Image (cartoon, rainbow, N blue to C red):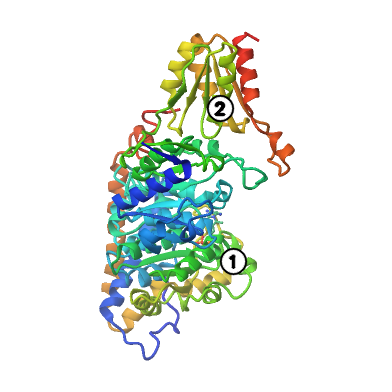
Amino acid sequence: MERPHAAAGVPAGRNLDLGRLRAHHRLMLRIRALEETALRGLAEKQVFGAIHPSIGQEAVAAGVVAQLLRDDILLSTHRGHGHTLAKGASAGAMLMELLGRAGGVCGGKGGSMHIADFGVGMLGANGVVAANIVIAAGAAHAIRLQGGARIVCCLFGDGAINRGPFLEGLNWAAAFRLPVLFVCEDNGFAATTRAAALTAGPGASARARALGVPAEEVDGNDVLAVEAAAAALIAAVRGGGGPRLLHARTYRLTGHTAADAAAYRPADEVAAARARDPIALAAAWLAEAGVPEAEIAADRAAAAAEMAAAYDAACAAPFPDAAAAFRDVQDIGSPAEMPF
Amino acid sequence: MAQMSYLDAVRTALAQEMRRDPAVWAVGEDLGRGGVFGQYRGLVEEFGPARICDAPISEAAILGVAVGAAMLGTRPVVEMRFADFALCAMDELVNQAAKARFMFGGQARVPIVVREPIGMWRSSAAQHSQSLEAWYAHVPGLIVACPATPADAAGLLRTAIRSDDPVVFMEHKNLWGLEGEMPDDPDHCIKFGAARRVRAGRDVTIVSWSAQVHVCAAAAETLAAEGIAAEVIDLRTLWPWDRAAVFASVGRTGRLLVAHEAVAVGGFGAEVAATVAEQRAAALRAPVRRLGAPRALIGYAPPVEDAVRVTAPMIAAAARAMVAGQ
Ligand SMILES: Cc1ncc(C[n+]2csc(CCOP(=O)(O)OP(=O)(O)O)c2C)c(N)n1
């Protein structure tokens, strides 16, 4: 891992909770290691479908999702491994899913783009950009009907704000004053297109504010800043203030998918982003605060070892049987009894 | 048994289901004023605005919200106003509602009922008249119900609301005022995939659903006067569909005619006809036939609109020709 550049100190005046920073750093390392392992699996032909890595964006997952309670609901996108792990899903079951194994969190039937763990309130990544925004409003609507203090957090990319469900979902959440935190995880790109090139106006926050949804912007590579911003917004949401939006600016260090070399980006832009790798920033702050380099290295090694072991276990695990194709389609008129 | 209109039957059944299960709620545009056809009249007074929920004109959100709310254990009844507007929520229905259970490996259940009023309703023109039931029958994960009578509408709606899987529930706009007998039992549920024999006959089987059932029954009446006994079968649900009932009937008559209001090309009649042709060829005394609308749009002016109707004389003529061996 590269050393952070000199300017990357903990901003003055910030009240550093070393324990939390250490936990965030560990979580980000685990997310990074999980995705690097997934990429290894792709190279080794153990992972079959598309992988959208969130490498470089881990501070958003760690900073936002760490603020949620276990009962809270999370909805994510095609780039959702980090969010899912942060919500508490098992890395072992996630890797099994990516490897299409029966022991996967979705039984091997969803893969990367539909990863979900309802047991920890993670209602799914989604293969359709922006689709989760209206579903999130619905989860919050159910919480309203049922009563209770749970909230919903919905993450989406900067490309998603140009789809209709962004307008419909935010309007709905605002009109019904529902407990949702919307998070626009802005990595600058919608697939291989610069999102700003085709997005009118000043972007996600302005659109949210136009609907009466208070919005904040934050440096999405600074896990402490993300956490602080998310904490304030979540407190407002939990307090019954209605929806909020957090616009986190970050950068995708890899291509859109593992197959995308991202040659459309100038090298100096990528180098500058690498110098602000959120994990390196956090490591530098830990070192500055006196955490020995050996301990930081040990955390890094532990994350890599955890994912390597989970990967080995997944490689050795069985695939689902073909009959799984006919399970959980529908009870009445199911393909098991009525193929056609 | 009470005499009731199709509209009052579904209104009554929904109210009964809402009394029975507090997790049931309805969401859609203008429901608080009774809904666009009056099928929610009086419900907000009994159940309040949280359970008879007015929605903004956001079809994708109405359906998407229902999906999310269903995943957390509520049972939304979604009003799409006209089947035509449900097209604004196709992703939410086809990619989300129909697939969540499977793609999340059984972790999600999406018990929603999506009400989509279909069909020609005098001079509603091209965007308020369609019968798109075949689209949904094509989508694994969905159940498709197309009731033709008040009792069936109520009984199928109850089953739909109690179903743990998503149901597309298509009421025909021209049937709202149709009167019929309604069983008093608030638990009278009609099984999905159980056809109803509207009329018995030995010469030709006519299969249909929704409002077209009544057109087929009128054709059968005409045929009876000529000495041709047509058996009319109302499928009631297109997925699952009661192939056993159709096979049994074709086994008796040796002839199958499927008639529907929707466009014939790629219509569900093609599915029924092909299945019988493949699996009951030996029973057939005549080639199967289907009647549906031409692959044309539905126009406003009455003569233009009527040009795409499948009428009783057309059905009678087709059946007559089949029986005559032409
Ligand atoms: C409705 C829809 N259109 C297009 C796609 C193809 N697609 C997948 S990811 C993606 C880019 C999305 O950009 P953004 O929302 O910014 O998220 P990011 O990929 O940057 O995380 C596109 C176009 C899709 N999955 N869904």
Taking depth in this image into account, of B60 and B101 the one nearest to the observer is: B60
Q: How crowded is mark 2: few (under 14 residues within 10 Å), some or many (20 or more)?
A: many
Amino acid on which disc 1 is placed: Ala
Q: Is residue B51 visible?
A: yes
Taking depth in this image into account, of B157 and B149 the one nearest to the observer is: B149
Quadrant holding the C terminus of chain A: top left
Amino acid on which disc 2 is placed: Gly
Q: Position of residue A243 (x, y in %)?
A: 42, 72
Instruction: Indicate yes or no: mark 1 CB to ligand 1 under 8 Å.
Output: yes
Relative horizontal placement of residue B259, taking residue A299 as reference (left or right): right
Q: Position of residue B194 (x, y in %)?
A: 39, 28
Residue under label 2, please give it.
B269
Quadrant housing residue A108: top left
Taking depth in this image into account, of B11 and B307 the one nearest to the observer is: B11
Q: Where is residue B29 in the image (x, y as percent from the top left)?
A: 51, 58
Q: Do the residues labelled 1 and 2 touch (CB within 8 Å)?
A: no
Q: Mark 1 lies on which chain?
A: A
The answer to whether marks 1 and 2 sit on the same chain is no
Which label was assigned to residue A195?
A: 1
Q: Residues within 10 Å of mark 1 (few under 14, many from 20)?
A: many
Q: Can residue A125 be seen in this view?
A: no
Relative height, residue B44 to residue A185 (above, below): above
